[in-house]
């Protein structure tokens, strides 16, 4: 469905959000930046995970490529992070192609893909923690900004970072709207809904998935570059750790898989929750309290609301007779058990 | 880097010992996948529960770790079956990814619950056997290592024959081959799933007792061991029992040879390197007969 309405809605919402720095204190503005950053990362994940139905448990890998890469280039050649966004867009896209090639070419999907992505990301922890040029276990730190320098993406106040990530997130959301309305978006959804049927109808499922993982990986690396300029610090666990990859997909799932607004809605609700839990005295005493909260939320979402908040809102709207754009939400198709390997396995068991 | 023959021999021997344990911890995962096509991402955390249980039985109740299986095995069976009944069974018919996400959520919950309860401390146990060493030429193995090896082999074989020879085992295999046909043959598939999940978790009770004397327990122990399970299971072919055994041996040997040759934690990179190599060459597992 090609209409201009979704773009206008996005522009209005982000236009209103542009006034937030005037209203929010430093603390809440920082939280808004985090919401947008995670929304950006979850939106990138959503291209392959939500629309394509291939859940990567290792998008921290691509995020880390951007974060480490940009930090290294700033420290050694003082190359602008803006340029790094372009460089690592390509590098991570190629890394995504490698991961996709490893897993998709034999039609091995679902659980298998999830296992491979999680294993490769964990491998990245061990590679970087032994790589002295990347600071090994200590990671890399950038000097703290002394003055505003837009060309080097350095700001002395939160406001500068806020507008950069606001624009980036608006762009990735408009890109998702555009992608979902194109033929490619429909191909991707057909892969998610029934890969064999899609293939039978002439959809090149392999190339569709390859493009999706490359796009998803490349965009995730752009988020990783922003991560390093925001925090000025990266270490192996802070990007390749399990928690990061889980957070990325959690926001997309809770918000609504395969929807434009889901990742933003999920991040807008959950990022403040985790910041509040982490900042509270109880949260500081009890390590891991916020991840425990996330685990509980993930389990409850899968049990009671697998289509996420936006998915539920859409089905309510549909029931009330309104029109719901953009096809069926993900995760509602009753899955046949994956019989890919079952004949052989049954015999071997 | 020293290529000392004795060091290599020692690494080979230790690798085989721990390889058997890696196989044992992975058979539960491969069984659950084989039967109901679910990858239980919380399997590593189930093992963590077993290790903590063993730790407390040994340190607080002063029970011999090898005797503690009498408590940990039934306990893990019940924990696994209860978690399956409450969380996984209601969404068994949903999209496969939903089940994966649910078990991922469980893994996060259990891991961080342990972190809150027990703090991040690394805990070990003392057993009399730890000071007993067995000398085989240049190779020295500790008694717990050898016991873990034989214990794992016996437990894996016992489970294998249980599945092959008993009625319940046949039901499990029947349900894994075709749930519909199994139902028509009068098998209660719903109960069989519950039972298989419980067994898949109970194997970790045995593994805990064998592993703890040579290993440690911490809230994140399941993260690494869980990853080992995934790699072993993918290497051996998902759902393939014998494959899990071969995969366990390969990873055990790779880890130990890598640690003997490479500095620091680079041996872990070697493990994942083997994993990627197998994915490139035989993505359906090293034992698959199917042409790729």
Image (cartoon, coloured by chain):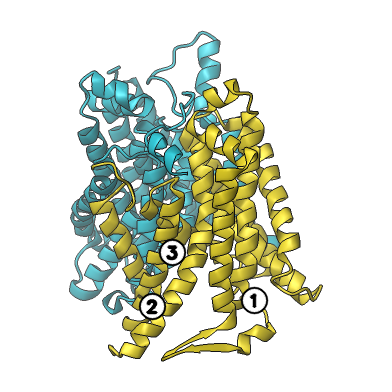
Chain colours: A cyan, B yellow
Assign the C terminus of chain B to one quadrant of the image.
top left
Answer whether labels 2 and 3 touch (C-beta < 8 Å). Answer: no
Q: Is residue A155 visible?
A: no
The chain that hosts pointer 2 is B
Q: Residue at x 59, y 60 (%)?
A: B155
For marks 2 and 1, give the CA distance: 27 Å
Residue A238 numbered tag: 3
Residue B218 numbered tag: none
- Residue corresponding to mark 2: B12
Q: Residue at x 64, y 39 (%)?
A: B168
In this view, which residue lies farthest toward the right? Answer: B61
- In the displayed structure, A5 sits above or below A270; it is above
Which quadrant of the figure has residue A157? bottom left
Q: Position of residue A77 (x, y in %)?
A: 18, 72
- Specify few, some or many for label 2: CA neighbours under 10 Å numbering under 14, 14-19, or 20 or more: some
- Residue corresponding to mark 1: B123
């Amino acid at each position: 469905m090609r209409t201009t309405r979704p773009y206008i809605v996005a522009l209005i919402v982000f236009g209103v959000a542009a006034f937030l720095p005037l209203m929010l204190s430093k603390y809440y503005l920082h939280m808004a930046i985090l919401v947008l950053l995670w929304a950006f990362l979850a939106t990138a994940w959503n291209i392959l995970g939500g629309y394509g139905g291939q859940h990567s448990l290792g998008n921290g890998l691509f995020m880390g490529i951007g974060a480490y890469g940009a930090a290294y280039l700033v420290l050694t050649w003082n190359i602008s992070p803006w340029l790094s966004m372009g460089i690592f867009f390509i590098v991570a896209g190629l890394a995504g192609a490698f991961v996709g090639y490893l897993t998709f070419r034999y039609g091995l999907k679902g659980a298998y893909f999830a296992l491979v992505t999680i294993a490769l990301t964990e491998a990245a922890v061990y590679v970087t923690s032994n790589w002295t040029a990347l600071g090994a276990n200590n990671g890399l730190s950038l000097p703290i900004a002394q003055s505003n320098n837009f060309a080097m993406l350095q700001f002395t106040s939160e406001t500068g970072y806020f507008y950069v990530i606001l624009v980036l997130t608006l762009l990735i959301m408009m890109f998702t709207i555009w992608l979902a309305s194109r033929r490619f978006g429909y191909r991707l959804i057909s892969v998610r809904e029934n890969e064999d049927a899609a293939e039978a109808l002439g959809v090149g499922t392999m190339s569709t998935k390859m493009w999706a993982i490359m796009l998803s990986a490349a965009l995730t690396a752009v988020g990783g570059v922003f991560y390093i300029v925001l925090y000025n610090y990266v270490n192996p666990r802070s990007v390749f750790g399990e928690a990061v990859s889980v957070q990325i997909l959690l926001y997309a799932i809770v918000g609504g898989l395969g929807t434009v607004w889901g990742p933003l809605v999920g991040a807008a609700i959950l990022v403040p929750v985790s910041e509040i839990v982490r900042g509270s005295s109880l949260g500081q005493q009890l390590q891991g309290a916020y991840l425990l909260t996330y685990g509980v939320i993930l389990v409850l979402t899968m049990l009671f609301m697998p289509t996420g908040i936006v998915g539920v809102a859409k089905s309510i709207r549909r029931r009330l007779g309104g029109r719901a754009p953009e096809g069926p939400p993900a995760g509602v198709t009753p899955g046949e058990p994956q019989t890919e390997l079952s004949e052989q396995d049954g015999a071997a068991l | 880097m020293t290529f000392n023959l004795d060091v290599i021999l020692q690494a080979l021997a230790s690798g085989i010992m721990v390889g058997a344990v890696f196989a044992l911890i992975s058979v539960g995962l491969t069984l659950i996948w084989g039967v109901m096509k679910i990858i239980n991402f919380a399997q590593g955390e189930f093992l963590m529960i077993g290790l903590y249980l063993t730790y407390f039985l040994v340190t607080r109740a002063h029970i011999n770790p090898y005797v503690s299986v009498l408590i940990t095995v039934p306990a893990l069976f019940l924990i696994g079956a209860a978690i399956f009944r409450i969380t996984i069974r209601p969404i068994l018919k949903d999209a496969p990814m939903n089940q994966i996400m649910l078990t991922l959520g469980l893994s996060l919950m259990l891991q961080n619950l342990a972190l809150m309860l027990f703090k991040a401390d690394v805990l070990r146990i003392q057993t009399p056997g730890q000071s007993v060493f067995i000398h085989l030429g240049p190779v020295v193995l500790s008694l717990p290592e050898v016991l873990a090896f034989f214990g794992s082999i016996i437990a894996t074989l016992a489970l294998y024959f249980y599945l092959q020879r008993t009625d319940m085992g046949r039901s499990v295999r029947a349900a894994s081959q075709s749930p519909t046909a199994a139902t028509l043959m009068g098998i209660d598939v719903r109960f069989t799933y519950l039972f298989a999940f419980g067994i898949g978790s109970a194997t970790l009770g045995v593994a805990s007792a064998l592993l703890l004397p040579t290993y440690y327990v911490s809230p994140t122990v399941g993260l690494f061991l869980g990853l080992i399970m995934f790699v072993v299971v993918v290497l051996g072919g998902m759902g393939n029992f014998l494959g899990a055994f071969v995969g366990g041996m390969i990873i055990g040997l790779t880890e130990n040879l890598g640690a003997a040759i490479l500095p620091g934690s680079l041996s872990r990179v070697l493990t994942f390197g083997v994993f990627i190599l197998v994915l490139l060459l035989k993505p359906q597992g090293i034992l698959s007969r199917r042409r790729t």
